[in-house]
Amino acid sequence: MRKLAAAGIAVLALISWTLTSCQREKRELRAAPVRRAIYGDAARQSELQPGGPQTEPQVTNPDHANAWSISEGQRLFEWYNCVGCHSHGGGGIGPPLIKKHWIYGGQPANLFDTIVKGRPNGMPAWGGRIPEYQVWQIVAYVRSLAGEQPFAATPVRTDELEQKPTTIHNKVQGETR
Amino acid sequence: MTRARTLFIWAAAVALNGCGGHQQSALDSVGPQAGKIESLWWFFLWLLTAIFLIVIFATLWALTRRHRGIEQEPLERIHLPSGETEHRLTRVVAGASILTVIILFALLIASVTTGKALSELGPKKQGITVEVTGNQWWWYVRYLNGDASRIVVTANEMHIPVGRPVMLRLNSNDVIHSFWTPNLHGKRDLIPGRVNTEWIEADHPGRWRGQCAEFCGMQHAHMAMWVIAEPEDQFERWMEAQRAPSKQPSSASELRGRDVFLNNACVFCHHIAGTPAAGQVAPDLTHVGSRLTLAAGTLPNTKGNLGGWIADPQNVKPGNHMAQIDLPPGDLEPLLDYLESLK
Ligand SMILES: [Cu+2]
């Protein structure tokens, strides 16, 4: 009887341990309306702020650390032909994206801006075309290229020849947003 | 509606299902290979039915016959059969085992012979070649031609000429799928990075439903395709129509609809010949209005369904790879007019 109880507890523990990994894979198949307008035009083009500094809106990527969203971002990175200019992160016409030092900043909000508004030296503006929820998925993926996603959520197997710094300097979940 | 009525309608629907033309059935073969597969199926069915009946009757007989042991009152605790009974039992069990092995071998030989006959069966005539590529979760269909300008691309639907072999080149863009149109042939896998081939031929005009037969992810169940066999001249007319670039908008609404299409993400994924939309990762929409179904056999191609699909694709096929795009009010209607006009 004691043995049976011990086995039961072990099984329960195993199940709950397995369940902890569910969050990593949470799939939001239909982006909710709020989710689709999460960012709006929060970013500023100028440092000058008439009437004194405002509190910066806190922008977090809803897709951070979500394995499914990151892999969706990976697919869209190909489908929307980011690979045409950035290759699989190694760079080509556009700069490499596997890096720590970004020209226009590497925070999710910066990447969102880069993608939606474009950048002067040849990065097209995708705003109004790529729906916002997908931009966030792409941001999550681009950050994974730079090793800014938890290792457990980062896609490590692809069909392409590509380098991933994830194993070299992976940050723990929570440290980056 | 009362529950009884709902139940009745369901039952009727299920029962009537069997009547309608057998559009997806291995037991209504219309091609040379499916014919052989069907014969094999019937051979198995009759042989196994006979065996089943024999076993059932033998069991019933054993249960109901008068048992000699019963007469020994009270029952001995250890009942040992006599030497003669023991002998008979051994013989019967050994005989039955040998017979079983022989029957299994007969089935095996029948199955292997059919497989061999199928693989040796070559087309008798010059045919056409069609490339079918699996995608999560739809079928890309391309009619090859030495002259690149005569290549035809469509999706989730394959028209074939009656009585002419169609060579299929099967491939996949993502995971393993399997092409299965039971009325025409058995299953054949679509494997990324390699081309599998098979050929099919329909001996009379008709429409048959095919389906992905290898689990390929969330929407595997909604990955169907229609094979439509037509007389040669009708088929050629269809090919000619498909070869043409997309129809130009002929009304103000259609014109606006085209602009809506070209100004949204649609162009990254979909191709419409004759417009700048050149996406290659989703079904070709050049002649989408001429197709029977939408979203790989999931919805009949009507304006209402098209609207429902574009407004909320994740409702129809949760997890599918079509983007959910919020069109401003007033944009959907013209877009539908335009897509409907692409016959
Ligand atoms: Cu499939």
Image (cartoon, coloured by chain):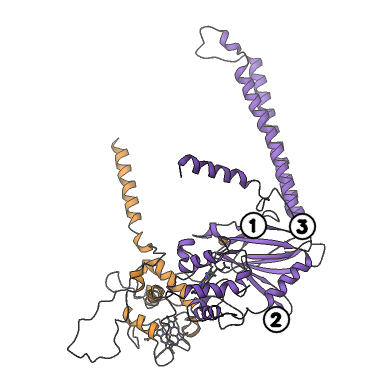
Chain colours: A orange, B purple
Which residue is label 2 attached to?
A: B149
Q: Position of residue A51 (x, y in %)?
A: 17, 89
Q: Position of residue B196 (x, y in %)?
A: 66, 64
Depth check: give the residue in front, A47 or A154.
A47
Q: Residue furthest right?
A: B124
Q: CA distance from mark 2 to mark 1?
A: 29 Å
Label 3, residues with CA under 10 Å away: few <14, some 14-19, many ≥20: some
Q: Residue furthest left?
A: A52
For the residues tagged 3 and 2, is the chain the same? yes
Which residue is label 3 attached to?
A: B204
Depth check: give the residue in front, B84 or A75.
A75
| Residue B262 appears in the rendering | yes
Q: Secondary structure at mark 2?
A: helix
Q: Secondary structure at mark 1?
A: strand
| Image quadrant in which the C terminus of chain B is located | bottom right
Quarter of the rendering containing residue A31 = bottom left
Q: Is residue B107 left or right of residue B252?
A: right
- The circle on residue A43 is none
Q: Of the residues shown, which amino acid type is indicated by label 3?
A: His
Q: Earlier in the sequence, mark 2 or mark 1?
A: 2
